[in-house]
Image (spheres, rainbow, N blue to C red):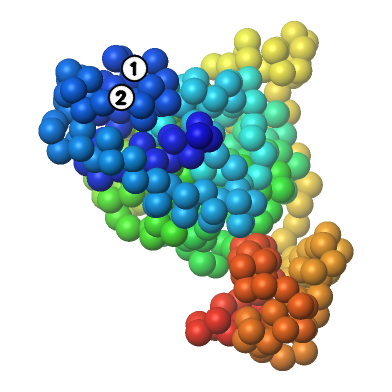
Amino acid sequence: MDRKLLWIWLTTLEGISSAKIGALLEVFDTVEDIYRADEEALLRTARITQKDAQVITAHDMRAAKKIMERILQIGAWVLTFDDAMYPSALRECDDIPYVLYGMGEILPWDRLLSITVVGTRDATEYGLKFTEQLAYDLAQNGVTVIGGMARGIDTAAHKAALAAGGKTIAVLGCGIDVVYPAENRRLYAQIIKNGAVITEFVPGTKAIGTNFPRRNRIMAALAAGTVVTEAPENRSGALITASKALNMGKDVFAVPGDYNRFFSQGCNDLIQNGGAKLCKTVEDILSEYTYQLAQLHGADYKIRKGKRLFKKKAETEKKALFSQAQLQTLDEESREIVLLLAEKNRHIDELCKTLNKDAGTVGALLTMLELSGLVDSLGGNNFSIHV
């Protein structure tokens, strides 16, 4: 049986937590061995209850097969704990994400110099501008920028890294086929062309509050350091990410702000009491990674800073340029769907009939076009072109 399918099966079984999987791997060498184990052998494993053993030996693969079908349908990839390309940093987590779902590149995670950039969703103009400059400068120096694709600071960091021609990684708190927030569909599409979007949550998982602290540990673990550019006191997911990074022994940086500013309190507290290093410019971060920069660029590399190569375009101009560029990169079937929807809104049945394709094939094409920001779902299997 396919090994990746077995990992999906094991990680989605009711009651089988990451800790229990860890206990199983201390007794059984492989996921195949866990699958083949009888109830008596499973019960000799720490943490495994009678109910757990019964759930495992039932060998119910139905849910896992549906997940794999969805992964294949949308063109995503799966990395498992025992894959050579699985990020070694995640193997050190207390709560290991044994399966990662992704879109875009399977990056050489262990060879990257990555920095996680986080902050408040309700960012101020000051926070956004500082984040844009910092993320741009990081990318200009070959640093991979990691974020959570949330509104505000995360979005600014991803966009600036892309504008600099760099790589960026978005770690989601939802399924790989769920774009959250919805207005970041174009950003999602851009990231998968210039980096990766990853998640531990199975396809279709909605973005609910309890998912984000779990997501944050992956963001902290994948990076050499985490920088918080703007965050209020106590009520910020960015501070959770910083705390997780500190607990992992990672570097944490924080951008100082006026002590009267609400959205600077979290950063100021991190510097004063939380073990964060003060960050005023990109050099404050990169000076900590001279060895890694030398590995990337050579021993004589000088930090690049301050060069801005992008200007904001009017929103209408950005949309038109994006749509034309996207259309040129589409395959023939996807292009035909876009042109059909440009004429009028259509039901999936009409598209199937016109294209002479089954609903599964057309549905998969529509999903990818939605993620690319070219098509909108109107509900009831009706679709329109995005304007």
Is 225 placed above or below 203 here? above
Residue found at the far bottom of this picture: 344
Is 176 placed above or below 97 here? below
User: How many marks do you count on the picture?
Assistant: 2
Is 346 placed above or below 358 here? below
Q: Secondary structure at mark 2?
A: loop
Residue labelled with disc 2: 37
Indicate the quadrant where residue 376 lies: bottom right
The residue lying toward the viewer, choosing from 378 and 46, is 46
Q: Amino acid at mark 2?
A: Ala
Q: Secondary structure at mark 1?
A: loop
- In percent of width and height, residue 108 lies at 64, 26
What is the crowding at mark 2: few (fewer than 14 residues within 10 Å), some, or many (at least 20)?
some
Which mark, by number, is residue 28? 1
Identity of the residue drawn at 47% across and 49% down = 65
Find out whether the residues at labels 2 and 1 contact each other: C-beta distance under 8 Å. Answer: yes
- In percent of width and height, residue 248 lies at 35, 21
